Image (spheres, grey):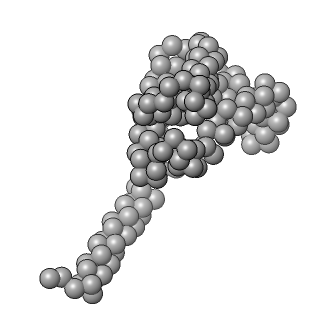
Amino acid sequence: AVSVAVLRDDISQLMYIGTGCSVVLSVACILYFPSRPAMPPSRAAAVQRMTLMQGVKTFVRSRQLWLLIVCYFACTGPAFGWLTVLNYSLLPLHFHQDESMWVAGAAIVISAAASLAAGHYTDKNSGHLRRTLVVLMLLSAASFYWFLLLFEGTIPFSKWQVYASVISSISLNFASIPVFYEMAQELAWLC
C-alpha cells in the first residue's frame, strides 16, 4: 500500500517538473523570438495601425457596435446564468443533480462543437453574418420555448425531449458567440 506521504511527495515532484518545463519554455520563447518578424507575414500586418486612443474613440462612437454589444449580452447572458442553476430548473421535472450534470455537460460539449461549426460556416460564407446570427438566435429561442412548454406541462413530458431542448437551446445560443465576435470585429474595424 502506498502511504499518503509518498503520494504527496510524488505529486509535488510532478508539479515541480511541470513548473520547470514551463519556466524553460518561457525563457526560451523570450530569448529566441524577435520582437517582430523580418518580413511581415501578410499584407494586413504591414498596414499602418491606428493608435490606441484613435481605436477607443472609434469604438465609443460606433452606435452599431454598442447595439451589437447590448444584443450579445441580452441573448447570451441569461443562457449563461440559467446553465449555472440548471439543476434547480430541472428538479421539478424529476431530474436530480446527477442527471442534471449530464444534461449540462452534454450541452457544454456540444456547444463547443457548435461554436466551431458556426465560426467555420461564417468564415466560408462571408457576407452572411447577420442572417446566420438571426437564424441561430431564432432556433435557440424556439428550443427554449420547447423547454418552457415541457416545463409547464403543455406538451407531454419525456426525458429525451428535455435533453434535446436543453442541449439544442444552449448549443445554438453559444454557437452565436463567434458570430457576434466576427460581426463586432467587422463593425469596429470596417473590414
Please give left or right for residue 167 compared with residue 144 in the image: left
Is any part of residue 6 visible from this angle?
yes
Q: Is residue 88 above or below residue 63?
A: below
Expressed as whole percent of the image width and height from the top left, the position of residue 90 reads 53, 43
- Asked whether, in this view, residue 118 is left or right of residue 49, the answer is left
Residue 171 visible: no
**Can you give x and y, in whole percent of width and height, for residue 107 in the image?**
46, 38
Residue that appears at 72% across and 30% down:
71
Out of 33 and 101, give the one closest to the viewer. Answer: 101
Seen from the viewer's position, the closer of residues 66 and 133 is: 133
- The residue drawn where x is 48% and y is 30% is 157
Q: Could you say which is closer to the camera, residue 119 or residue 153? A: 153
> Where 91 sits versus 174, above or below?
below
**Going 59% across and 16% down the picture, which residue do you hit?**
135
* Position of the N terminus by quadrant: bottom left
The C terminus sits in image quarter: top right
Q: Is residue 62 left or right of residue 171?
A: right
Question: Where's residue 167, x and y in %?
Answer: 47, 33
Image x and y of residue 97, in percent: 46, 53
Task: Work out which residue is located at the far left of the displayed protein and give it.
Answer: 1
Which quadrant of the view contains residue 81? top right
For the image shown, how many numbered marks are present on the structure? 0
